[in-house]
Every structure is written in C-alpha cells, then in structure tokens.
Image (cartoon, rainbow, N blue to C red):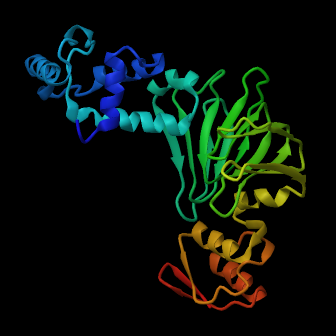
Amino acid sequence: MTDNPKAKALLDRYLNGECTPGEKTLLESWYHNIGSGDEAYKPSWAEASKMQFLRQHYPGKRKQLLFTALKWAAAAAILVVLARTAFFFPGRPDLHRESAAAMYSAVTGPGGLKRVQLPDSTIVWLNANSRLEWTSDFSGNKRRVSLSGEASFDVRHDATHPFVVHTADADIKVLGTCFNVETGTRQSPTQVALLRGKVAITMTGKAAPGLILQPGEIAACSAAGRMLRKYKADVSPYFSWNSGGFYAADMPLQQVVEKLCARYGYTVTWRNRRGGHKHISVSFPRQAFKDMLESLCYLNHLQYTIDNHSVHIR
C-alpha cells in the first residue's frame, strides 16, 4: 500500500462512497477482470486477503467493501488505466465512461510514414516519430483521437457527429475536412493548417475563447504560453511530408536542423551555435536525408559530420 498511495486514495474514496460514477465503473471493471485464469485468485485466497485488508485498514467498514476479492499488489494496474484515460481525455469527467473501452494506437519511428484508416473511414497519414490513439468504441458521437507528433487528416463528413483531435495544446473539432496538425514542443506551438472545410480550435484546459479556421489559414496554439492565433498562408507545403518532403516555416535554424535530423533518427550536437537563433523557412521535395541536410547546412554556412546516428554541426 505504501508503494501505491494514489491507488490507496482512490480505493479510500470508493469505500467512503465518494467516487464519481466513472471512477466507480472503472474500478469495478478493473477488479472483476484482474487475475483472469490465474490460480492465485482462487476464492479461498481472495477471501483471506479481503479479510486481512479490512482488519488492518478499515475496521468497522467490512460491509462497505463491494469487491469480491482484493490483491493490493495488483492495485498499480488501476493507475496505469487511469493514467491512459487522463492522457486521452484530460479534465473531461463526463468522458470517464469511455475508459473501459480498449485503446488502439498507430505509431511511427524515425523516417516512418504510415497510412491509417479509422473505423469511420477517415484517412490519417502519420509523419515520423508520431503516435495516434483512439478507443474501440470510436463511432457515432465518439469520433475522438489523440495525437502526438504530426499527422494529416482527411475526415469523413458527418455533420451530426463532429470529429475531434486532441493534443497537449488544443482540441481541434471538425465536421468533414482536410487539415494537417503538428503538435508543439517546448520551442514551438502546435500548428494546424487547413486545406479545405472548417475547424474550430480551443486551447486544452483553458476557458479562453477559441477560433474558427478557414481554408488557407494556419493556427498556432500553445496552452502553456496562453497563445492562440491564426494567419493566412500557402498551406500546401505543410502537406509535403506526405510524399517524403520536408517543410519548416519561420523557425530558428537550430530547431529546423534538429527537426530534420529527428525525423530520420539522428541526434544533433552543436560545436558552434552562432546563427542558430535566426528564423528561416525551408521546403524540400522528396529526397535523401543527407541531401537535405547538405543543402540546409550549405545555405546557412554550416559544416557537419555524421558519426553513426549523430550529426555534429560546426
């Protein structure tokens, strides 16, 4: 119990009748499924464990325990499930009922590019080093996904059931549209480029007003920096990575180099960061990583060497 204080606090609330309906459903669903097929969970052991736990920690409350057995070593599993639920729908108590659904994900590594078709026929292209998650009950009014990294979406139109992309910075709500999302980092905000359709964007966890994005507009959002703005621009370069290209708009040179290298699984070390803070924009068609790195360094008067999967800039 001392190793799982959050699990103990959650069970305390359960025993005292203070859990939300979602927490209660999640706990009972988790409990009734632990140890399935495991001989260690036989009734005699379960009853002994339950009574020992009650005698030590909850004197006088035995009738309140609704579980038919209890094993504290498994309590950490609660935290795993709750952590995944909180990540997927942070600050959304009305969505706790969805936590019992199975989680699915699509992941790409360095240099990876993956096409994903969601259950509603929405097509998602995942860029390198990205992760998309959705639940098994993805349908109807539950068309919600969580994104880390970069992806372009071609959402199947359904005016009565909006599609929502959740990131650490923003919730992006659409009806039927094509757009690109690149989630933010410490140095840069989340960016949403709209090719067609219409999307509504609100900052995650903030009460600040959102904005509506029209085709040919780009939104920049940072929940930490309390910043949400939009501007008009040519959005087509934002989709160039779908065909193997690379694009960066108005970013510090150092960040552009690191972004390009990270996409292909390379780390970067800097022996001289002079000029690294100047902002640049670059657009490369599909070509080899070393060709893009060579051009980028040549145009900005940098020299580099590659050692295994490490790029050294000087």
Q: Say if residue 193 shows up in the picture.
A: no
Which quadrant of the figure contains the N terminus?
top left
The residue lying furthest to the front in this view is 60
User: What number of labels is visible?
Assistant: 0
Q: Quadrant of residue 50?
A: top left
Q: Position of residue 215 (x, y in %)?
A: 89, 45
Q: Where is residue 202 in the image (x, y as percent from the top left)?
A: 74, 38
Question: Relative to residue 238, is residue 95 drawn left or right?
Answer: left
Considering only vertical position in the picture, is 152 above or below 255?
A: above
Question: Relative to residue 298, is residue 59 drawn left or right?
Answer: left
Q: Residue at x 13, y 20 (%)?
A: 55
The residue lying furthest to the top in this view is 63
Q: Position of residue 292 (x, y in %)?
A: 70, 78
Q: In which quarter of the image is residue 255?
A: bottom right
Considering only vertical position in the picture, is 235 above or below 120?
A: below
Question: Relative to residue 13, is residue 101 drawn left or right?
Answer: right
Considering only vertical position in the picture, is 178 above or below 78?
A: below
Q: Say if residue 148 shows up in the picture.
A: yes
Q: Where is residue 176 in the image (x, y as percent from the top left)?
A: 79, 33
Q: In which quarter of the image is residue 198?
A: top right
Considering only vertical position in the picture, is 221 above or below 26?
A: below
